[in-house]
Image: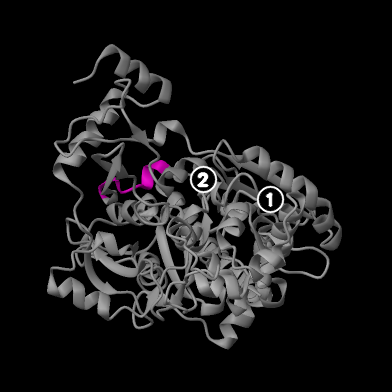
Amino acid sequence: MFTEKDLNQFKNKGISQEKVIEQINKFKSGFPFMQLSAAATKEYGLKALNEEEEKKYLDEFESNFDGNQVIKFVPASGAASRMFKHLFEFAEKYQINEEGKALFEKDKGFNSVFYFFEHIQEFAFYEDLKTVLTQNRLNLEEEIEKENYGVILEYLLQDKGLGYAALPKGLLKFHHYDDANRFAIEEHLVEAAVYGKNKDGIAALHFTVSPEHQTKFEKTIAQVKDKYEQDYDVQFDIKFSQQKPSTDTISVTPENEPFREEDDSILFRPGGHGALIENLNEIDADIVYVKNIDNIVPDRLKSTTFKYKKLIGSYLRSLQEKVFDYLCDLEDGNLSQEELNEMYEFMATELFIEVPNYMKAMDIMEQMDWLFEQFNRPIRVCGMVKNEGEPGGGPFVTLDEEGKKSLQIVESSQIDFTQKDQADIVKRATHFNPVDLVCGIKDFRGDKFDLTEFIDEKTGFISLKSKNGKDLKAQELPGLWNGAMANWITIFMEVPILTFNPVKTVNDLLRDQHQ
């Protein structure tokens, strides 16, 4: 199947021939659907703190994090082009009538192009757009008055102007402030300064970026970093990484043969955000917060974000301390059945890990080995928001091939909706996943886990694409917060909807939460 040129291509990417063959076989066999047992709800599988518990964990936040290295991990490599999809479509069919007025689409709803232009002055990038038009001897207000929208979009989206369509979301102006309007990435600096600062006054952040954008990220941060360090009495430790070429996946034809470019090289594509488990695996920290680049709010709304970031972090540490105590006891040995029963109770009620009926009848050493294996894993607490019709995956109780239950974040693409029982479970779901995670990635001895050992390789998925007019099949790795963390200890905790404010289209920046 492969030529010498192919093998050299694999070598240059750092991908083994065996790995490529494995990926091709997955195209042939497909990925199985997840088997849902139930939706994770407050009745089972999802923790909702009461006021007393909230106060307790907030009060304990400082002490729980004392001496722990905390990092805020932000996937930031995706281009913002999809934010402007409706503007591109409008620009392609843009027409004016005999009076020189723009022919608008009939839709004047919130997500329409009409709404975009009606409220263009409310965007944080408006002044930048105005400046770049002035530099090209154009007046933005006049162009708006003349409904010369094609020109305006050219200077917003294309390289001749702001070039927003080719930039990542982190480098777009998101929010208005009296002193200066902020890039999305700036809001993450502010967040880290509040809940990620250690006792030495250092706040660490790690951004995953694409190679072509890293210099721009570094330049932008260099321009604003000093201001926030002064305002928040903090010193930032900021690092970048890029998705590894070795995590790319092969593309195939509809017949499952390697898809070849015109120069006969094989087409590889990025493996999706699941590839970032490799980047996360190289971070040396005790606690890692994971949050998407576009899920941010202005300062006036940040207090809720700060509160729940501290809550899920403090709750993680309290669980981790208990788990670590149990692991130390199990390592020392000489435990009674009563002591093991206490561990079983904690495991079932606090960690939602199912204890097999036969386990307590096993030899005590076998019980200890099983408990040790169950406890000695990375831990994550995942904030979950009440379902109000927003898209995205959700928290479910799932069954593996052996019938073992576990808590998993499951995407809709992983669910077989043709099966009535599965579709009914989804209908009963009460919460969805806003990607609000805090992760404990070291073991009870203080050593880093190898996170690649906890991936469920069966949870990738296949999508249909095309290139140069030819159909192809692409493969994505198990998602970062789905299959890549499938074998972690997982806790779901309810957080308010105000903590979830993503920007999927540019018009989302006109919502109250971003103004």
Can residue 134 be seen here? The reply is yes
Neighbours of disc 2 within 10 Å: few (<14), some (14-19), many (20+): many
Where residue 117 sits in the image (x, y, percent)?
A: 58, 70
Residue 280, labelled with which disc? Answer: 2
Q: Nearer the viewer, residue 82 or 157?
A: 157
Which residue: 67% across, 42% down? 216
Q: Which residue is mark 1?
A: 204
Where residue 483 sits in the image (x, y, percent)?
A: 34, 52
Marks 2 and 1, the one that precedes in the sequence: 1
Where residue 96 sits in the image (x, y, percent)?
A: 50, 65
Q: Amino acid at mark 1?
A: Ala
Which residue: 31% across, 24% down? 262
Neighbours of disc 1 within 10 Å: few (<14), some (14-19), many (20+): many
* Mark pair 2, 1: CA separation: 14 Å
Quarter of the image for the C terminus: give it. bottom right
In magenta stretch: residue 453:
yes
What secondary structure do most residues of the magenta stretch adopt? helix
Query: Which secondary structure, mark 1?
Result: strand
Horizontally, residue 475 falls left or right of residue 424, namely right
Quarter location, residue 29: top left
What is the tally of numbered marks visible in this picture?
A: 2
Which residue: 60% across, 43% down? 284
